[in-house]
Image (cartoon, grey):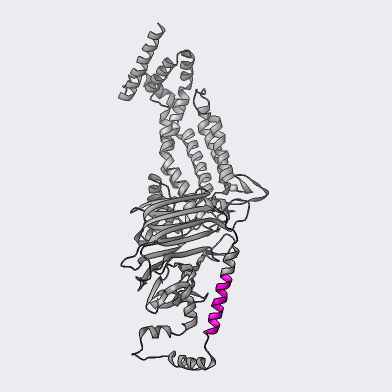
Amino acid sequence: MEEKKFDVQSLIGFILIGGILLWMLYTNSPSEAEVEPQQETEQVEVPGNTDSNQPPQQQETQTPGADSTALSQARERLGAFGYSASLPSATENTTTISNDVLELKIDNKGGYISEARLTNFKTFDSIPVYLIKDGNASFNINFTTTDGRTLDTENLYFEPEVTQSGDNQIISMKLKVAENEFLEYRYVLKPGEYMLDFSIRSQGLSNVFSSSRDINMDWQLKGYRHAKSISYENQYTELIYEYDDGDDDYLGGGDSEEQEDENVTYVAFKQHFFTSILLTDTPFTRGKFNSQNLVQDEEVDTVYTKNFAAQMPLELNGGELNYNMNWYYGPTDYTILNNYDRNLDEIVPLGWGIFGWINKYVFIPFFSFLSGVLPSYGIAIIVMTIVVRIVLSPVTYKSYLSQAKMKVLRPEINELNEKYKDNAMKKQQETMKLYSKAGASPMSGCLPALMQIPVFYALFQFFPSAFQLRQKGFLWADDLSSYDTIAELPFHIPFYGDHVSLFPILASIAIFVYMMMTTGQSMQQAQQPGMPNMKFIMYLSPLFMLVFFNNFASGLSLYYFTSNLITIGIMLVIKYVIIDEDKIHAKIQENKKKPKKQNKFTRKMQEMMEQAEQQQKQKKK
């Protein structure tokens, strides 16, 4: 871009123009004799003039507070909207409305919420939870007028009017061009609700708005930090929006992301456990969304987590604006959001497909029941874990039984490996025959384990999203939705943090013992080429738990610790009470003597292997 240079001639021109304007103002100023009658006339006309024969325009200019000089100057800057700038409401005042869960302050300037406080919640350091405060959020409508001015509502003054309809509190914020011509924001707050009715409408502005230029609505918010672990909170802080009649998408995982979609019906700025949402009855034709990560260094005590921005165009209908919408400022609680029946439950990250289904219809109702009847949320987690493990115990039994069979067959498999060590194809054939006769299969131990994955993943999604756990203590953990601290470190360890959490340590030990009991048997087998190193995996999982779960919710670590303890107990019962390896060996020997009817798959596989062996022999000849 070409650099702009200082223009001396332009400066001289501006000075001359300024001098001429000053001279004109001086020569055209009224004398004292002219001023006195004019003042007397104004003093008579302004207070309560009810002359019905007076022209409407004259009544308008004599509205109290609409000083003619101020009005003239304001209209030079703002055109028709100069009228609002000359009213007594053109101040930095705010209007407050509240119910038993939410307190809102709405500014005259911009007509938007300047403060939103959730009255029943505190941050991790006992400060009231504010979603909006100290200019961290803005709401603006940018439009062009028919006289060529481009204006922003965030810089203009609205006139507030507070009314009551039953128990509902109503604030009407009007940006006026005349007494009965205006752009209105209307807020309706109901008792006990986090959701407000909100509408944008205009009256008499069809000749003011330019229909040839887009009218854009911009909403921005910088999310305040509310939790002890900023990295954990930031992980679940994201922008979610719904589009195309029920689809939803999100962004916020990277340092900076931008997306666009059409037919947008709501936009949510989620800050883990608290969310700000804008919903509309009339879908926005398109939406442009942006998320920027503000946490550059997790060691620094950052005030904000992410900066969100959404831009949507507003369409004129008959030259006027008319949108019915809602604001939501409240907790990211699945039950509360789901009760609105607006697809807002998608804001809570419960997992996709079957994982989300398990959470919605099994774990959320069950945990709500337990937490309602038990004295502690920690006890509710333990009881739910016990029930889950008991329900899955038949699967655990199947898995362990398969491992026991493989252990009994290990000597015979070793013999086959040694006998056919130079013929891999023959070794595979004979091994499959042995498995078929004995009624055993290495896959029969894997399938039960795979069946448990949806449950484990669903619970992995459930605990970080369970709003009920927020600031609920158990044993040494003062907040089950955040990490539990038993020691502070004088330094910061990458991926680990500057503290030591006990529940992840206990969970890691339990996982290691469990894997010793299960994977330990597998490691007795000769390491097959191409197979993963089981010993490495056995150490990797507990290490992963120890490091990465140090900053996770202690409720999640409590679940894994309890789950693995129960699983270890179940396996010990299965091993020493239910399963008898000598009986299994005898049963296998009986099975081997019986003629085994092969299923189609096994027979087909054996035929293919025999054909491959024949082809190999022919090639050697």
Measured as percent of width and height from the top left, residue 460 is found at 47, 46
Extreme residue in the top direction: 621
Main SS class of the magenta portion in the image: helix
Q: Is residue 231 magenta?
A: no
Q: Observer-nearest residue: 537 or 498? A: 498
Residue 314 versus residue 49 in the image, above or below: above
Q: Observer-nearest residue: 221 or 612? A: 221
Q: Quadrant of residue 284?
A: bottom left
In the rendered view, does 40 fall on the left or right side of 338? Answer: right
Write the residue at 46% across / 51% down: 258
Measured as percent of width and height from the top left, residue 512 is found at 56, 37
Residue 172 appearing in the image: no
Q: Observer-nearest residue: 472 or 138? A: 138
Residue 558 versus residue 273 in the image, above or below: above
In the rendered view, does 163 fall on the left or right side of 504? Answer: left
Q: Is residue 25 magenta?
A: yes
Write the residue at 36% across / 11% down: 614
Residue interval drawn in magenta: 14-27
Residue 84 versus residue 413 in the image, above or below: below
Residue 269 appearing in the image: yes
Residue 517 versus residue 369 in the image, above or below: above
- Total labels: the figure holds 0
* Screen quadrant of the C terminus: top left
Q: Observer-nearest residue: 227 or 540? A: 227
Measured as percent of width and height from the top left, residue 590 is found at 38, 21
In the rendered view, does 350 fall on the left or right side of 533? Answer: left
